Amino acid sequence: MKRTLHYISFNSAAMMLLATACSHTSTPAPQEEPPLMAAETRFTPMNEQQQSALEQALAPMLQAENGAELWFHAATEKDDGSFSWCISPAPSESEWVSIGHISHTTLQQLAAERTTVEHGDTLDYWMRLELRCNGYELPISLCPAEEFGVYIGDCSSVRARDFHNTLWNALDKKYNIQKRLDKAVQE
């Protein structure tokens, strides 16, 4: 009898261990993230809709082997040398100025980006640019402080540090923008 009880309790314990080891525990649902603080940045993978929207927005540019022209929405008032002069004002106070060219390779790299960016409120300035190619115009918004995020057309903000630098370099070449920004930061 004693042997039977040991056998039964051993089998019961083994079955419980086996059941515990084989049971699939569901992973808890991700907790909701807290709201972004000012100037905080969060990177997340793009979903299929975001990827598709970016590819569709850039498709006309990618079909042209020569890339696209880059235009900047610049203030019409006289350049006073300040950084704020470079911020795109209201349409009635600005005009489109050609500032360079974006290569086909750069546009392909941009279309291949797969990360979106969420920014906390930075209260920073925005610069409006536009890519133009074969009658197609694609608006771009760029913020100096948000070095990873670029808004392209109606797409979500794209983590595109290299593309941001390309745009920034074109602005710098035309308006000496980095020197202006450094001066504004020091003041």
Image (tube, rainbow, N blue to C red):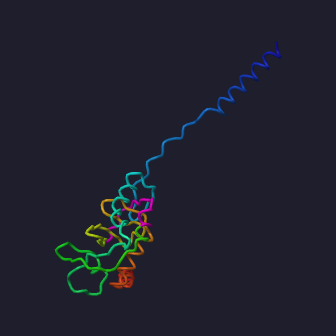
Residue under the point 26% across and 87% down = 80
119 left or right, relative to 132: right
Picture residue at 37% right of the left edge, 84% below the top: 173
Magenta segment includes 112: yes
- Of 74 and 12, nearer the camera is 74
Q: Which residues are magenta?
A: 108-125
Q: Quadrant of residue 99?
A: bottom left
Viewer-closest of 121 and 14: 14
Name the one closer to the observer, 187 or 147: 147
Could you tell me which residue is drawn at 35 percent across and 70 percent down?
143
Q: Quadrant of the N terminus?
A: top right
Identity of the residue furthest to the left in this view: 92
Q: Residue 145: percent from the left, percent from the top?
A: 39, 71
Residue 120's quadrant in the figure? Answer: bottom left
Location of residue 151 in the rendering, given as x and y in whole percent from the top left corner: 34, 64
Looking at the image, residue 25 lies above or below residue 182? above
Depicted 78 relative to depicted 114: above or below: below
Which of the image's four quarters has the C terminus?
bottom left
Please name whichever residue, 91 or 66, is drawn nearer the observer in this view of the structure. 66
> Quick check: 66 above or below 179?
above
Total number of numbered discs in the rendering: 0
Where residue 26 appears, as percent x and y from the top left, is 54, 37
User: How far across and down, in percent of the image, does residue 11 sit?
Assistant: 74, 22
